[in-house]
Image: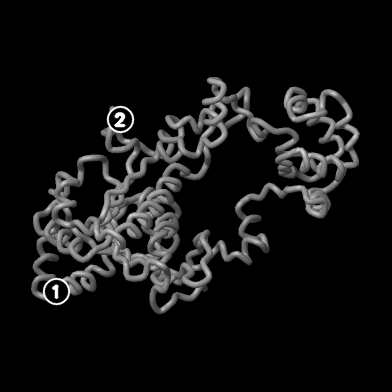
Amino acid sequence: MTSFASQASGSLTGIRVIDLTRVISGPFCTQILGDHGADVIKVEPPGKGDVVRSQGNMVNGESWYFAQFNRNKRSLTLDLRSAEGKQILYRLLEDADVLVENFRPGVLAKMALDDDTLRERFPHLVVGRINGFGSSGPYRDRPAYDFVAQAMSGFMGVNGPADGEPMRAAPPISDMVASQNLAFGICAALVRRERSGQGDIVETALTNGLIAMMGYLAAEFFATDRVPARTGNDHPMLYPYGLFRASDGEVAIAPSNDTMVERFLGALDMLHLLDEARFADNRQRMANRDALREILNDVTETRLVDEWIEHFNRAGVPCGRVHDLRETFADPQVQAQEMCLSLDQASGRVPVTGFPVKMREAPATLYHPVPRLGEHTREILAELGLDEDELKALEAQGVI
């Protein structure tokens, strides 16, 4: 088991986050903040809580899907539709530093927490929000999920084989990217607040995050006014670059410039190919990619994947095996980087992915297991000053 620290010690220690989010976009953001020390209070409706608690594979009564996005948090059940629940939320916000929500635009306003009210009543507060398309524009009120964002951002349009249909990425990439963007934006707003004393409203959208990731594909479109073609596992602008056949599988090889191409071909004892006009420079190699691919595959399929990886790494050629997840988490480099952690839950051992950001002086730590629904309700409300009689009354009314 990975042991839990006795208390948070990361860079965000002392920051309190009120988390109204659910599913993935939002919970991943607040987990990042919690990993780095923030006190994250996950507010959930009484009864079933976050819908993801009942989704995915259940092991000993616990959703490992939910566990992946909700460590380092405390759980408070609260009916935000009730007047009493709203009043408790307002009291929480008085001492909070950050509020995070992923409702559709306008939902917070129905709780009497529109932007003007938030700024007036809680001027210190950093409000972070994630939605599908942003809070302005003709699509602001549309519902959105990752699949829709992948489709409408152009992301699916550049993925997949040239002669096939557009292809989604398997992970919920728009949710994850929007969450990371929001965590960064919240941290930036907290730094600004240290200087100005004023909070801010920080917004990210699933679709916007993927559009910003279009990178050189967007640059080529802007420069040429041509929609980039789908190229499967081939690079849209470089060759040789992609998957090559070995005798027992495939090798991912990424020579990203002419120097790397020379190293790659030299490692294959095929530098002479550069003397041929059709392969002399990258433009010609792109035009004759299929022919060059077959020539190279005839050589690479003569040896094992592991042999090529050792050979190419000695030559300074970026390469790697195509792993499935079992192979990924068994890889000694992944293990050395502690990219799989084990949470000691009441239900038993729960593996989750590790911390991608490594900090020496104030590293991310595990200090809270994934909370049971409402596990910390009484603790949190007692911190607000509510006594036992008040707690019993709220329970009887179904508010908590």
Where residue 35 sits: x, y (%)?
Answer: 42, 64
**Which sits in the foreground, 260 or 381?**
260
Residue at far front of view: 195
**Which sits in the foreground, 304 or 61?**
304
Q: Are marks 2 and 1 in contact (CB under 8 Å)?
A: no
Question: In the figure, is residue 260 to the left or right of 203?
Answer: right
How packed mark 2 is, by other alpha carbons closer than 10 Å (few <14, some 14-19, many 20 or more), is few
Mark 1 belongs to which amino acid? Gly
**Which sits in the foreground, 346 or 131?**
131
Mark 2 belongs to which amino acid? Tyr
Task: Quote the CA–CA distance across marks 2 and 1.
Answer: 42 Å
Q: Secondary structure at mark 1?
A: loop
* Residue located at (46% from left, 70% from top): 365
> In which quadrant is the C terminus drawn?
bottom left
Q: Is residue 271 visible?
A: yes
Mark closer to the chain start, 2 or 1: 2
Q: Secondary structure at mark 2?
A: loop
Residue 385: mark in rendering: 1
What residue does disc 2 label? 139
* Residue located at (53% from left, 37% from top): 215
Where residue 288 sits: x, y (%)?
Answer: 77, 24
Where residue 359 sits: x, y (%)?
Answer: 51, 67
Q: Is residue 371 visible?
A: no
Residue 63 sits above or below residue 169 on the image: below
Residue 259 sits above or below residue 155 on the image: below
Residue 287 sits above or below residue 46 on the image: above
